[in-house]
Amino acid sequence: MGKKLAVISLFTALLFIFSGCSTLVGLFSGKSDTMMEYLESTNDMDSAHLLLLMEEETILSKEELLNFTENKLLPGMRDFLNQAVDVREQFDDEELLEVHDLLIASYEALIEGNELWLADHEDEAAYQLMDEYVTLYDQYTNELEALANEWGVTITWEELDLEAESE
């Protein structure tokens, strides 16, 4: 349980809220439209992944955490990974795909880390993979925001609320 809280507490759940084009370059190159399509394609998936991790934080007992990890977290993350792979096939811009690959790699690290943790709760490699997830996901959000700005799109991040989402 402690491993989950430590990993998850390193980031605040964020929701993509995106708005307008801020440069003419983005407007005329079509890059802003591509970015808006990408954000729309990934928003629900990524928000759901963050909500799943927030739900994990609320678990107090080791037994519940084991059950949650095996029966909800891992199946959910595998589904999000499949969705991310499908989204990748919708786009052909190399810069955007490089950024998107960070999202895929972060999901893969989280899945592998949790699989190892289920097998051996003391496995240092599991914790390293969960740390890698945090690093990759943070890199993904930073690079996505930078690319969006370059393409004339401003991303405004908003905190997710687990309680509001479950109502």
Image (cartoon, grey):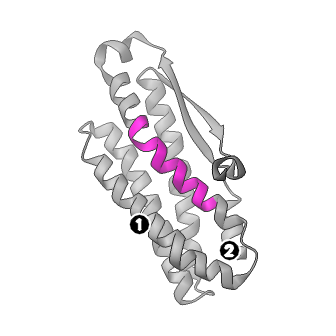
Q: What element carries label 2?
A: helix
Amino acid type, mark 1: Arg
Q: Find disc 1 in the rendering and name its residue.
A: 78
- Would residue 131 be counted in the magenta stretch? no
Magenta stretch: dominant SS? helix
Label 1 or label 2, whichever lies nearer to me, is 1
Q: Residue at x 58, y 41 (%)?
A: 15
- Would residue 52 be counted in the magenta stretch? yes
Neighbourhood count class around disc 2 (C-alpha, 10 Å): few under 14, some 14–19, many 20 upward: some
Picture coordinates of residue 65 (x, y %)? 65, 78
Q: Find disc 2 in the rendering and name its residue.
A: 3
Is the residue 158 above or below the residue 30 in the image?
A: below
Q: What stretch is highlighted in magenta?
A: 39-53
Cα separation between marks 1 and 2? 20 Å
Q: Residue at x 73, y 75 (%)?
A: 2
Amino acid type, mark 2: Lys
